[in-house]
Image: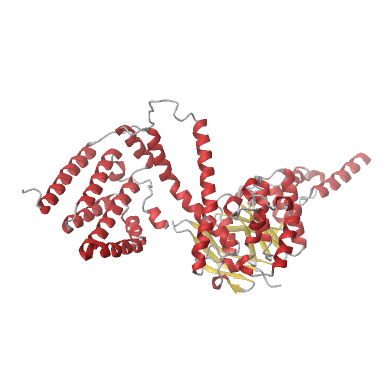
Amino acid sequence: MSAILQGLQWRREDTPIHHLDPRSKLVWFLSAVALTIFAWEPLLLLMLLASVVPVALAARVAGRWLSALKSMTFIVVFATLLNILYYGVVGGLLTGLKFVTIVSFFSVFFMTTHPDDLGTALTKIGVPYTFTFILITSARYVPILAWEAQEIVDAYKARGIELEKARWRTLRRYTMMLVPLVICTVRRSMRLAEAMEARAFGSVKQRTSLKDLKMGGGDYALVSATIALFALGILAQLALYGLIHL
Amino acid sequence: MKPLISAKGISFSYPNGVISLTDITLDLYPGESVAIMGENGAGKTTLVKHFIGLLRPGKGVIEIEGVNARTMTAAEIARKVGYVFQNPLYQLFSESVEKEVRLGLTPLNLPRDEVERRASKILEDLDLSRYRERHPLMLSEGERKRVALASVLIIEPKALILDEPTLGQDAVEKRKLAELLGKLHREGHTVILVTHDVEFAFEVCDRILIMSKGRIIADGPRREIVTLRRVLDEASLTQPQIPRLAALLKRAEFPGDTIAVDDAEQILISLFAEARSR
């Protein structure tokens, strides 16, 4: 669980990938995910997955990316098996591959982009700040929620309730722990709302941000390469479908 | 005497690589009252979570009554060692105070009248009887802390660990808590406090353990620890007020190991009397 979270969490690093403008990374990330969803050609999917490797290495996040993938083995295998039942062996395996690829893009994007920068980028693109804020805060509260859930599980064990020996009843006991978790979350959101009001959230229509974004040479290179490769990928896939003739 | 909880050379680091405990060895005996103190991040909570099996040492062994804690689940240890969390909200699951308090007894399969007896006694002891039917979340912060404490005490553990029990408590609640802990201690319970509250710790506990950066830097009776100003400084703790007064009045032959307010009062009275007679 914590490995998955670690594989999505931004950390301060001094690499070219971290310094890229969040907008250009967003373009890269969204096109990569869109193409992965669109593509059904195995070679194309493998190339997409392989394209994560140099980025992860350059950003020095390859280790965390791989351990996040490793801790998701169960979900991936389960999803693949389920898909094999519906779409047959090839379709199932391809869906599994798509899943792993999309998770990898998510992982690398979020490990290298600070939620605040993502927020600024979205605001610049024209997304209303209220929505951006919801997105950033929910991302920010995930680790806190995970920590809190662990603390509640511990409190439950400390009451002498058995959770370590797996039994059918154990599963039912876990549902009881939703009570404190939900209560704490609701309380926290009330406090957050109060703190926001105290700081006059929403009183100004036009927000300015402390850190202004600036596209550099690397950003333009990334965006143009992304657009070119994205178009190429779409065309290749369409040609393979027989929808167009190259 | 056989120790109740014993740590033998334990070290622990969190999965993110942060080293939290380094080579800790200590014995806690039945009937002791111990305060574990130190700055934030010194490893106090991490250490006591080992005593109940919520964390397992990376190196070394924890023994509960001479038995390796690794052979027991946290729930099994909880029958011997009670643990009250810092935030009561994390440990309240039920829709009434009474159900909350009884929850810890479900795995014990006790006869119904015994459950009833224990529940009534503990609610009485902690001044919670009138809230029996209330929802725990409808209570005040201090009352909620008492419910959390009651729900652990009802299991009748031999040792009781309280993590920051004075946080958010007013002076009256603090005094009541001190009285309750004193009573439990006299009844033979081992009481272990994790706290920043020097006044409270030195008032309630006989033995003081000071931690800094994952190590124990001092361990001894409070009369000895209270004079170790450099050690207290290292752990970002201030001396309690009475010993500070004692240090200021050193030239007037005020004994430096005075802790209790009553003792200080007696000494001051006799010093004044002496001065006047001169």
Residue A117 sits in which quadrant?
A: top left
Residue at 29% x, 65% y is A81
Q: In the image, A46: left or right of B62?
A: left
Above or below, comparing residue B126 to residue B112 in the picture? above
For the N terminus of chain B, the image quarter is bottom right
The chosen color scheme is: secondary structure
x and y percentages locating residue B46 in the rendered image: 55, 58
Residue at 82% x, 50% y is B263
Furthest-left residue in view? A246
Residue B35 shows up from this direction: no
Above or below, comparing residue A188 to residue B30 in the picture? above
Please tell me how many numbered marks the rendered image carries. 0
x and y percentages locating residue A89 in the rendered image: 22, 65
For the C terminus of chain B, the image quarter is top right
x and y percentages locating residue B155 in the rendered image: 67, 64
Residue B196 shows up from this direction: yes
In front of the other: A243 or A141: A243
Q: In the image, B271: left or right of B41?
A: right
Q: In the image, A225: left or right of B113?
A: left
Residue at 42% x, 56% y is A2
x and y percentages locating residue B135 in the rendered image: 64, 50
Residue at 26% x, 62% y is A86
Above or below, comparing residue B1 to residue A181 in the picture? below
Furthest-right residue in view? B277
